[in-house]
Amino acid sequence: MQVRTRFAPSPTGFLHIGGARTALFSWAYAKRHQGQFILRIEDTDVARSTPEAVQAILDGMEWLGLDYDEGPFYQMQRMAQYKTIIQQMLADGSAYLCYCSKEELDALREQQMQQGVKPRYDGRWRPEDGKDLPVPPQGVPPVVRFKNPSTGVVAWDDLVKGRIEIANAELDDLIIARADGTPTYNFCVVVDDWEMQISHVIRGDDHVNNTPRQINMLKALGANIPQYAHLSMILGDDGQKLSKRHGAVSVMQYDEEGYLPEAVLNYLARLGWSHGDEEVFDMQQFCQWFDLDHITASAAQFNTEKLNWLNAHYIKTCPQEKLITETIKRLKAKGVFAEATSQLSDAIALYRERANNLNQLAQDIAFFFVAPVANNMDVEKHITPEALPIMSAFVTKVSKIDWSVEAIHMAMNDIVTEHQVKFPKLAMPLRVMLTGGAQSPSIDQVMFILGREVALQRINAYLS
Ligand code: GLU
């Protein structure tokens, strides 16, 4: 059997973390089985769907590198197809017209509530052998209802949750087309999963309740029933339902906040799925390992610390070229203009080991390109009256050396020996003067990358 999976977001908001994980699992499952992955935009809720949300989904998929073999298909462009199938179902008796007005349905519901029974459609327009149907009222446009089997059970072996069985008596006859002729959500999903020949439906478990109805409709259409895997939800760090309050929830916000897509993907892959103790793996490896047997049925909990740890790992292993592009972009966002020079590349090489975030990396190296505003406490602590003559002597010395890390280092050694002070008495004020703060990698390396002219300007600014 050809594996065909799909991701079917409703464009009513950005691509959030839960959606991205669903997309990732569907994508990986198709890749693992040399199948196809399809993107389908479920935009039939016209009141809530927006072009911006469609774009946000496409951008999020692209940022994550989740490429699709078919699509994007838009349900709004498939209306004629849904309507044709509704007509076929009316003709073959698997669907029927229902003329109940809203008032009648409200009254029915009211009555059922009073009797303490579950509100449901009572089948008054449902054709049955030997049953006399009411006469259609004048001027009332009917809805179309699916004729759900009234007996037996509908069951499936969920690839995450195990066997699920629902008695048909629990399900009433679903409206598949509204009075204005537009098809409803569950029906569109059914037609699409059928026509797109989806073999595995991997989706959030908020859709578990739709599945029995969808299976019954697929059966009525004579379609193959796909396998279903319903993923449990993702909870925040605090065990509560994931929401804005937990920080970034949109995938693109992770980009804005300095995460590499590789880190987010690796992180999402482990959110509710495992392969032994493996924590760090790329998507190629993931696609070789991924299966539906190792998805946890319980809710997965978000762990920001782990995501940050993975981000640090991927920054360390990221190709230098990519880090250069990312850093230029992020410096620019801070109003710092840097070009892809060897100076920028050297600065990144020096700082990347310390960074667990791309924005932090940009922040850390911004001082190479704009004079830093020094931290007052560091200035007071390190740029003391005793430090000034030492710095002065150092300026004189480094004005004449060959410009290399080794020569700068030797000059520093010479000065501390001459002034009979410990190394930090020179290194610390130098750090503050050059970088604006008391923390940096080897200051001789920093100074070398900064260049003689700028370095001396920054030191002299404190000496004059
Ligand atoms: N459009 C649905 C959603 O965004 C998903 C439907 C499905 O996967 O069957 O929640």
Image: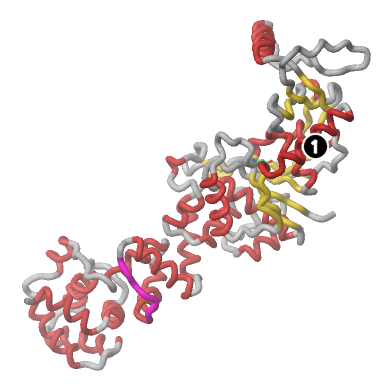
Name the spot of residue 289 as percent of width and height, x first: 69, 60
* Residue displayed at 57% across by 59% down: 62
> Which structural element holds mark 1?
helix
Asked if residue 51 lies left or right of residue 104, the reply is: left
Name the spot of residue 100 as percent of width and height, x first: 72, 15
Asked if residue 212 lies left or right of residue 261, the reply is: right
Q: Quadrant of ligand 1?
A: top right
Foreground pick, 51 / 261: 51
Whether residue 321 can be seen here: yes
Name the spot of residue 149 as percent of width and height, x first: 84, 25
* Residue displayed at 41% across by 63% down: 358
* Residue displayed at 46% across by 57% down: 255
* Residue displayed at 35% across by 65% down: 332
Residue on which the image places disc 1 = 84
Asked if residue 113 lies left or right of residue 90, the reply is: left
Q: Residues within 10 Å of mark 1 (few under 14, many from 20)?
A: few
Looking at the image, residue 350 lies above or below residue 136: below
Q: Quadrant of residue 114?
A: top right
Name the spot of residue 53 as percent of width and height, x first: 53, 46
Q: Is residue 308 found inside the magenta-colored segment of the image? A: no
Name the residue furthest front: 139
- The amino acid type found where label 1 is placed reads Thr
Foreground pick, 409 / 331: 331
Name the residue furthest right: 130
Foreground pick, 133 / 352: 133
Looking at the image, residue 244 lies above or below residue 57: above
The magenta segment is 336-341
Dominant SS type (magenta) = loop
Asked if residue 20 lies left or right of residue 385, the reply is: right
Q: Is residue 338 found inside the magenta-colored segment of the image? A: yes
In the picture, which quadrant includes the C terminus? bottom left
Q: How is the image coloured?
A: secondary structure
